[in-house]
Amino acid sequence: MMSGSAMEILNNTKPGPRRIALLVWVLMVGCTSRTVADARIEWPPLGAACAWVNVDLSLLDPAREIASVRSLDPSRSGELPIAFYEEWSSANPESGELRPGIIMHHYETMTVAGHYFATGTYVYYLERDGVFYLWGDDMMGHFDGMVGPFSGDPRRMLPGATSPRVSPSAHYGNDGCGEE
């Protein structure tokens, strides 16, 4: 059984077909984008079934290249995360194939400026560029656009920009989180 990093194993493998196959594997794994949270990246736990959180956009730093204030308002933004995918599935963004360099994480119990409560919030992190975007849908018959880009690593920026909020289903009756 081999142990160590892929590069250590590669460096300790004798030249030949096995080393070539291992090199191809290392390159393929290293270049593969993920449609869910990348296993190498720890995402902070934010929100829970009975402990939703809301992102206050005023607590995030917009990236310099932001073109319009509309890009910071989910109800006015016309953007969707389609450009982040090789193959896009609006019904299930986690099943789509992300483009290389895009890392996506889904927070099921996070809203953004009160939006995205039906799907939760999808975070799209462009690690190389040091920016991230947020997107989701209310499924209320109106368009909810993607917001961003925001500067920084979302794993560090989002915890400081969230606050507790009432479960969206609590507005419509018992949400299963205790006494009404």
Image (cartoon, rainbow, N blue to C red):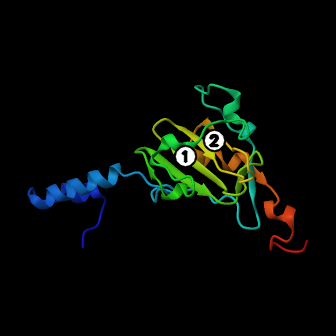
Horizontal side, residue 58 vs residue 96: left or right: right
Q: Amino acid at mark 1?
A: Tyr
Quadrant of the rendered image containing residue 144:
top right
- Residue at the spot 81% in from the left edge and 70% down from the top edge: 175
Residue 149 spot, x, y in % from top left: 60, 35
Q: Secondary structure at mark 2?
A: loop
Comparing 39 with 80, the one in front is 80
* Between marks 1 and 2 in the image, the one whose residue lies nearer the viewer: 2
Quadrant of the rendered image containing residue 73:
top right
Residue situated furthest front in the rendering: 141
Q: Amino acid at mark 2?
A: Met
Q: Secondary structure at mark 1?
A: strand
- Residue at the spot 66% in from the left edge and 47% down from the top edge: 158
Residue 106 spot, x, y in % from top left: 59, 56
Comparing 33 with 44, the one in front is 33
Residue 10 spot, x, y in % from top left: 21, 56
Q: Which residue is mark 1?
A: 124
Name the quadrant of the C terminus: bottom right
Pointer 1 or 2: first along the chain: 1
Name the quadrant of the N terminus: bottom left
Tally of numbered discs? 2
**Pointers 1 and 2 in contact (C-beta within 8 Å):** yes
Distance (Cα) linking label 1 and label 2: 10 Å
Residue situated furthest right in the rendering: 180
Label 2 environment density (alpha carbons within 10 Å; few <14, some 14–19, many ≥20): many
Quadrant of the rendered image containing residue 74:
top right
Q: Which residue is mark 2?
A: 146
Question: Residue 61, relative to residue 100: is it above or below?
Answer: above
Label 1 environment density (alpha carbons within 10 Å; few <14, some 14–19, many ≥20): many
Q: Which mark is residue 89?
A: none
Horizontal side, residue 124 vs residue 100: left or right: right
